[in-house]
Amino acid sequence: MIRLFLSIDMVGSTQFKARFSGQGSQGWLEVFQAFFCNFPLILAGQVGFEFIDDERTPSIDIWKAMGDEVIFAAEPQSAEEAASILRALLRAMALYESRYFERIPLRLKGTAWLVAFGEQNIELDIAELAAGDGARHIDYIGPDVDLGFRLSKYARPSSLVVSLDLLEQLLGARNAGDLAFHLVGRDELKGVMFGRPYPIVWVSDAETGFDFLPWEIEECPLVAAAAAAPPSEPKRLLDAIADMRLYLRKMHGVDRAPLVLRS
């Protein structure tokens, strides 16, 4: 079983809440309630639009909400389906910002990653947290689940940061041209790949590109690099994946096979 996880988080939320210091939650609570209620609806609408001509519309379920972040889980049946889900997510992020954040100093950033469940990663059915009436509460645990949360540190507005497993599948999709990929740097992720610097890859909609604000470009070197450079060539991205796989095999005796989505 391979699942696609999608994390959407608010940028600037801490400072935004601080503006209402001394007022309790009055002033900011409505903004956050609207996000948790309305963003999933907008995402569902964009997914429906993206798959309107397909026989199957994938289900994207909320896994959990944490602080200012909501995490979804899906089970794409092919690389093409995963690419279309990401495109719908990017459009949902842009649409939500235009509707709800036009005069508010908040933005959305996203992380997307694949996890294969079986040996290393497991699903837990926690009966004590179920809502009753036959409902189930499923939690996910494992190093590849954790990888996504480590990677989310490098998420920025107007884009998605993606794992290498997901990137490899997207590059092989027939609709890969709907997305643009930017290798913006490398950095060590705690507890990931034995400390080998991990490629940081951002994805944007190929039609619209990034929508960085001027001060975001000025303040963040990664954003500046992405804004100034064209999308990375597929060969460069595939080489980065192959280099990581070689490092794991040569230095640590680990064979990390590709996660293959059914086509």
Image (cartoon, grey):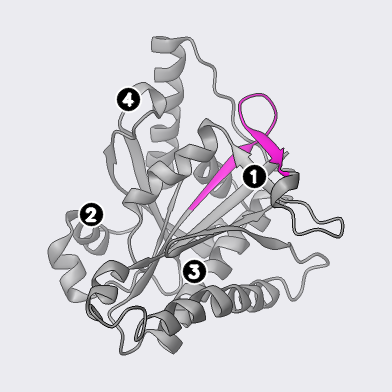
Label 1, label 2: how many angstroms apart (C-alpha)?
Answer: 33 Å
In the rendered structure, find residue 222 and report the number of the disc placed on it: 2
Q: Is residue 121 in the magenta section? A: yes
196 to 203, vertically: above or below: above
263 to 187, vertically: above or below: below
Point out the tag, 1 or 2, that comes first from the N-terminus: 1
- Mark 3: which amino acid? Leu
The nearer-to-camera label among 1 and 3 is: 1
Q: Residues within 10 Å of mark 3 (few under 14, many from 20)?
A: many
Indicate the secondary structure of the residue bearing disc 3: helix
In the rendered structure, find residue 90 and report the number of the disc placed on it: 3
Horizontal side of residue 76 vs 219, given as left or right:
right
Query: Which region of the structure is painted magenta?
Result: 112-126
- Mark 1: which amino acid? Asp
The nearer-to-camera label among 1 and 4 is: 1
Horizontal side of residue 38 vs 60, given as left or right:
left
CB atoms at circles 1 and 2 under 8 Å apart?
A: no
The nearer-to-camera label among 4 and 2 is: 4
Which residue occupies 44% across, 76% down? Answer: 32
Label 1, label 4: how many angstroms apart (C-alpha)?
Answer: 27 Å
Indicate the secondary structure of the residue bearing disc 4: helix
Point out the tag, 3 or 4, that comes first from the N-terminus: 3
- Mark 2: which amino acid? Leu
Residue 138 in view here: yes
Q: Nearer the viewer, residue 82 or 176?
A: 82
Horizontal side of residue 86 vs 223, given as left or right:
right
Q: Quadrant of residue 51?
A: bottom right
Q: Return the residue at label 4.
A: 195
Q: Return the residue at label 1.
A: 139
Indicate the secondary structure of the residue bearing disc 2: helix
